[in-house]
Amino acid sequence: MLLSANQPYFSPFPGFFCKAALSDILVILDEVQFPMGTTWITRNRFKSDKGVLWITVPVWKKGLGLQRIDEVKICHERGWERKHLASLKNAYANAPYFVDHLPFLEEVFSEKFEHLIDLNLSIIRHLMKALGIETKMLLLSDLGIGATGIPRLVEICRKLGASRYLAQAAAGKYLDEKLFRDAEIEPAFFTPPTVVYPQLWGDFMGNLSAFDLLFNCGPKAHDLLFSGHRSLRSFKKQELG
């Protein structure tokens, strides 16, 4: 069984879902420390007529010290939800499938969510369903694992009975492969392809939020996610066994 793990990014890019699709189980690392600096957990890139459109969720940090990701609360001040929703409507009004996701976006950009983790998980689940990805998703906080760092990843694999752990190739230099192999878990690495597809507003921009792919391509997004010079399905069969 192949397992992967990832922090709960805000509106993740297509590569996040490529890794999820290759995995039998995706574990969301909601109990790890929330980064002190800039992070993909609170923001992501979209596209407008002016170029990159950053959408950022403000959160409470000042005076709170180190927080776990699942402890971080959203700051519902200054009407940022209304502004972000208006920005997306302006940027994607002419995208053929934007209207399909508009009711969900209107729900997301409300004051419904108190904690960032709940907002991000809602978006991730919506995107996985829209992309046709049926990988089982579990939360680290539900697993009762006390280890930290790389040993925590090993313990996740052990607890869930995974024989292989999938990570992006760029993370290989940070993983202690011997630690995994000593636990009879085989590390596997892949590089997610840049999914190329028709976009609004000029030259193509890669690795935007997966919403951009869905707004522009709708039902074709699933096949585009697995397209390219090397099919991810073939990768899973040939290189992951």
Image (spheres, rainbow, N blue to C red):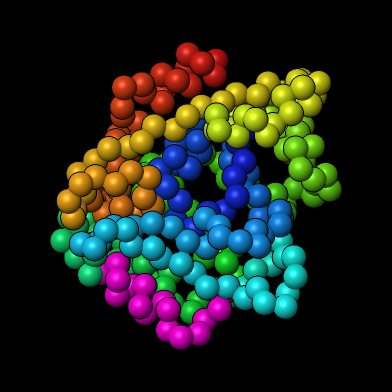
Looking at the image, residue 211 sits to the left or right of residue 216; the answer is right
Looking at the image, residue 177 sits to the left or right of residue 24; the answer is right
Residue at point 60%, 50% (across, down): 7
- The magenta region covers 74-89
Secondary structure mostly seen in the magenta stretch = helix
Looking at the image, residue 132 sits to the left or right of residue 1; the answer is left
Looking at the image, residue 31 sits to the left or right of residue 92; the answer is right
Quarter of the image that includes the N terminus: top right
Residue at point 65%, 73% (across, down): 61
Residue at point 20%, 62% (across, down): 49
Quadrant in which residue 179 is drawn: top right
Q: Nearer the viewer, residue 24 or 184?
A: 184
Question: Residue 66 at x, y = what percent?
Answer: 74, 65
Q: Residue furthest right?
A: 146
Q: Is residue 76 magenta?
A: yes
| Residue 83 seen in the figure | yes
Quadrant in which residue 75 is drawn: bottom right
| As drawn, 102 above or below 208 | below
| Residue 161 seen in the figure | no
Q: Nearer the viewer, residue 183 or 132?
A: 183
Question: Residue 112 at x, y = what percent?
Answer: 50, 76
| As drawn, 9 above or below 118 | above
| As drawn, 177 above or below 145 | above
Quarter of the image that includes the C terminus: top right
Question: Residue 18 at x, y = what percent?
Answer: 45, 36
Question: Residue 194 at x, y = what percent?
Answer: 36, 36
Q: Is residue 121 magenta?
A: no
